[in-house]
Image (cartoon, grey):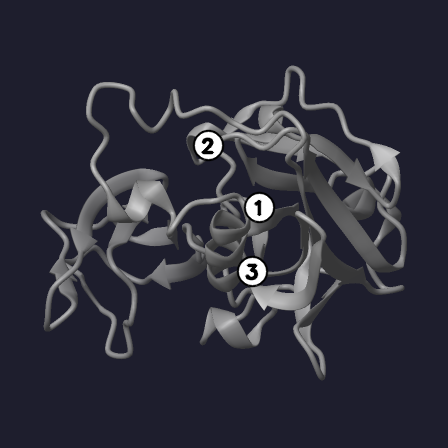
Amino acid sequence: ARRHPNLLMIDYCDLEAEGVARADLNTIHADALNWRLQGYDHNPWRGAHQFKRTIIDRPVDPCSGVVVRYRFTVGDGLPAACLEGLQVGVERPWLYQVQLNGQRVSVEDAPRWFDEDMRALPVGAHVRRGENVLALEARPTHVLCEIMPVYLIGDFGLTPAERGFIVDAPARLALGDWTAQGMPFYPDAVRYDFRFQLAQAGRLSLALPEWQGSVAVVRLDGQEVGTIRVPPFELALQGSVASGSHQLS
């Protein structure tokens, strides 16, 4: 089972700034274009050093503005409860007016997510089945308005589409590759639980011959007994394990 919500990274967007409109840009290219349109040679946070407050205090045109639109598609199979619980992870959302499908999304009291500059905005009330459009609008622009990916957060599975993914019902996780089970962007932990019967007490070891993760935390009957992280991906359990029924996680 997933230990945390699933993610969809949305790293393509439409950009409107300074009379220029471009559709379907990767956020890296949209960000570079926006900085040029705002009068910069490049993103100052990636290609320069700030002396005292020279970048952050650089004057901003009060008539400047930028609108970034991100799109995602929700399938008919997503349960209503999952739809209502959806959130969107946005970097520095307080710099923008945030709308989903034309409805304003409040950024006040949104919980911190991932780092101190990101917030998880509840959007379930405004999500609809089919295409959804999340718009971030800054007027005037701000030197901290970098165009970055946004992240859909919640209990869902992702089905590959002709272009991108469809947000659909979560599937029961089986052994094997997570990316083929609706979780191509999931970055966190999964727990596998197994029950077994031991006819008589004895010493046991655990081997993960097809292990491809970073670290496996092993628990026996709810108690942590060790970790597996380096070849040959085996763990010898300390002491003798009693006979009877046990749960391995």
Question: Type of residue at label 2?
Answer: Val
Q: Nearer the viewer, mark 2 or mark 1?
A: 2
Disc sitting over residue 11 in the figure: 3
Q: Nearer the viewer, mark 3 or mark 1?
A: 3
Lateral position of residue 215 relative to residue 240, left or right: right
Lateral position of residue 247 relative to residue 200, left or right: right
Q: Is residue 191 above or below residue 50?
A: below
Question: In whole angstroms, how far apart are the C-alphas of marks 2 and 1?
Answer: 31 Å
Q: Residue at x 52, y 27 (%)?
A: 60
Disc sitting over residue 5 in the figure: 1
Q: Residue at x 57, y 29 (%)?
A: 61
Q: Position of residue 44 (x, y in %)?
A: 34, 42
Q: Residue at x 52, y 58 (%)?
A: 33
Q: Position of residue 232 (x, y in %)?
A: 10, 73
- Identify the mark nearer the N-term, 3 or 1: 1
| Circle 2 Cα neighbour tier, 10 Å, few/some/many (<14 / 14–19 / ≥20) | some
| Circle 3 Cα neighbour tier, 10 Å, few/some/many (<14 / 14–19 / ≥20) | some
Question: In whole angstroms, how far apart are the C-alphas of marks 3 and 2?
Answer: 20 Å
| Circle 1 Cα neighbour tier, 10 Å, few/some/many (<14 / 14–19 / ≥20) | some
Q: Which residue is mark 2?
A: 143
Determine the image quadrant of residue 190.
bottom left
Q: Position of residue 121 (x, y in %)?
A: 67, 32
- Element type where label 3 sits in the image: loop
